[in-house]
Amino acid sequence: MITWKKCSLVAAVIATMTAGPAVAQETVSAVVIDGYPDRALWVREFTNFFIPEVDRRLAETGNYAMSWQENYGGSIVKPRGVLEGIQLGLGDIGIVTTIFHSSKLPSQGLAAVTPFVSSDARAVARAVDEIAREYPVMQNEFAAQNQVYLATGVVLNSYQMFCSDPIESISDLEGRKVAGAGVNLRYLEGIKDAAGVRGGLTDFYNMLQTGLVDCAMLWPEAAASFNISEVGPYMIRTDFGAVNTKTVTVNQDYWNALPDEVKDVLRAVAIDYRDHLASIAMDNAAAAEATYLETGGTIIDISADERAAWGASMPNVAQELAATLNGNGEDGTGMLESYLAKLEAAGFVGVRDWTQP
């Protein structure tokens, strides 16, 4: 007697024999590194946004799946060690803090050398990233470090001045000591007897508290995180502008071995991550300023005339960068002009034309 159970078994066997061959899903491993802890904005959003979005897009075809291994907070590299870590293959994908590597990655300083133009993180991130795709210099710099550039990131809206006393004009800064880092310290060079003192975020509170400096250059979110209102109760809204400091890169050897579909997804998601970070940075800045006021801080706006005078007093660091890149065989002048044109098209015109000597 042929039972229903037997019929079902026969049908299953026939279906198996006649079905086409199954396509196996390939798993791609990726070791992600950053020296900063997972609470840092860009690291947190790499986990919460970048990785899930890559997974979601790859799942649409089902050809590939990623196996992520995230290593943050110094488990593989320190904050300054990401560039070298990716170069050596200690990680496959990393978030490079570019301000640590001005000699190896000079073009990444494009936004920093053009202050007083835009305090919109979204516009700056988009403009810098577009420049990286239109001019080979940024990608060449990373290629020299055995890396593939994916996208730049902006995690702050603008550097401001946080001071122990009220400052309303650049003349009020004469003879003052100001803490800062990197190119920012050059913003002081046109102010009589003003002295820049090199420091970092973790140092600024003590530097202000002990009177080692009168002011510090940082951004509102950092000021809120480090309780700067306690020692720097006056935020001077200079609006130096947003700067890019984080770039997602991939080890070149790892990249060469990736399937094209995975490469395409990583490129596309990196751009979305760029815009995602910038939007959060703008939201965080507004909230941080509110927190600064709530905790006893006062915000003083520098007038447009004072900002223009400040910009005019500075050395043209933008021209210096362009000349350096030109000397390296790159189109530094064209890159600078194109970058500022992009910001102007987005509605941002600086207090000084950095393309002119």
Image: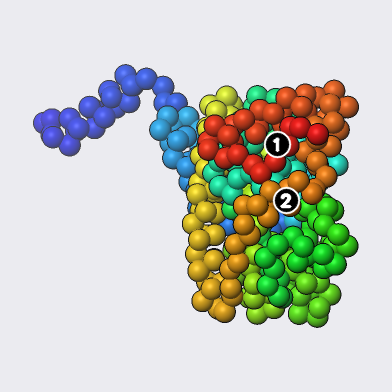
Quarter of the image containing the N terminus? top left
- Mark 2 or 1, nearer chain start: 2
Name which residue lies at 33% across and 21% down: 19
Residue 335 in sight from this viewpoint = yes
Distance from the alpha carbon under mark 2 to that under mark 1: 13 Å
Where residue 56 appears, x then y in whole percent?
44, 40
Q: Is residue 355 above or below residue 307?
A: above
What scheme was used to colour the molecule?
rainbow
64, 345: nearer the viewer: 345
Q: Which mark is residue 150?
A: none
Q: Is mark 2 on a helix, strand or loop?
A: helix
List the residue tagged with mark 2.
Answer: 309
Name which residue lies at 60% across and 45% down: 118
Where residue 146 appears, x then y in whole percent?
78, 33
Quarter of the image containing the C terminus? top right
Where residue 349 appears, x then y in whole percent?
60, 39
Left or right: 268, with 215 as reference point = left
Q: Quadrant of the rendered structure where residue 109 is?
A: top right
Q: Residue 353 carries which label?
A: 1
- Which amino acid type is shown beneath numbered disc 1? Asp
Q: Is residue 179 above or below residue 129?
A: below
- Which amino acid type is shown beneath numbered disc 2? Ala
Extreme-left residue of the structure: 1
Q: Is residue 346 above or below residue 302?
A: above
Left or right: 9, with 233 as reference point = left
Q: Is residue 284 above or below residue 320?
A: below
